[in-house]
Image (tube, rainbow, N blue to C red):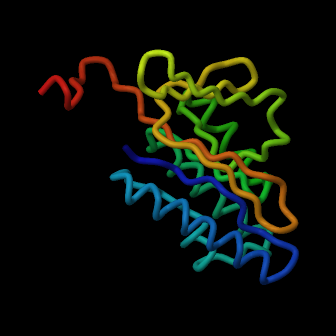
Amino acid sequence: MIYYVCSPYRGKTPEQVQVHFDYAVQLTREMLLYGHCPITPHLYITACLNDNEPDERKIGLEAALELLEKCDAVIVGQRYGFSEGMAAEIEKAKQLNIPVFYRDRNIADFKNLTIVCDKSSGYAKTRIIQDDVELQRVTSFSFTHEAGENPVFNVDMVEPEKEGETSEDEI
């Protein structure tokens, strides 16, 4: 699958921009290691255009939105919040009916988060219920907490099979 990686770039200081850049690299690496093809425009467009120059920023955002149109899904890394550019990318994905998956959500974002471990069938089955909806096809989850940051909840999920495709178990 081709994933569009959506995460913040701008920051108030050069150090904050570097943190955001490193986070985009981390998300891109994860997509590659999962066997996907990530497109992360802010890793290279910002090397060619000046993000602080409004006309050049607009050109970069327009190019990024065109790339998004070619993607199968969007992965939103929100550990460091949402930017104006991210909001435009998410809106565009929704207009195009491209699935949007969220990573690194602050636990404070959930009204209700429940993790249930059921051993009644002889083996442990863990269920995750987020805002009264059970998450399906979860392969792993974790909590992290960095100094000065809110706790973060990460969920990795198996992609739903597309109609007409056979799973590896059926081959």
Question: What is the count of numbered marks?
Answer: 0
- Say left or right for 146 vs 4: right
The residue nearer to you, when weighing 70 against 168, is 168
Query: Is residue 143 shown above or below 26?
Result: above
Query: Is residue 162 shown above or below 150?
Result: above
* Quadrant of image for the C terminus: top left
- Say left or right for 56 vs 120: right
Give the residue at x 57% y 70%.
43
Residue 121 placement: quadrant: top left
Residue 79 on image: x %, y %: 73, 56
Give the residue at x 83% y 68%.
147
Residue 151 on image: x %, y %: 78, 52
Residue 106 on image: x %, y %: 78, 47
* Quadrant of image for the N terminus: top left
The residue nearer to you, when weighing 7 against 35, is 35
Query: Is residue 67 shown above or below 93?
Result: below
Residue 16 placement: quadrant: bottom right
Residue closest to the far bottom: 14
- Say left or right for 51 vs 32: right
Give the residue at x 62% y 53%.
6
Residue 100 on image: x %, y %: 59, 36
Query: Is residue 14 shown above or below 40?
Result: below
Residue closest to the far left: 171
Give the residue at x 74% y 75%.
17
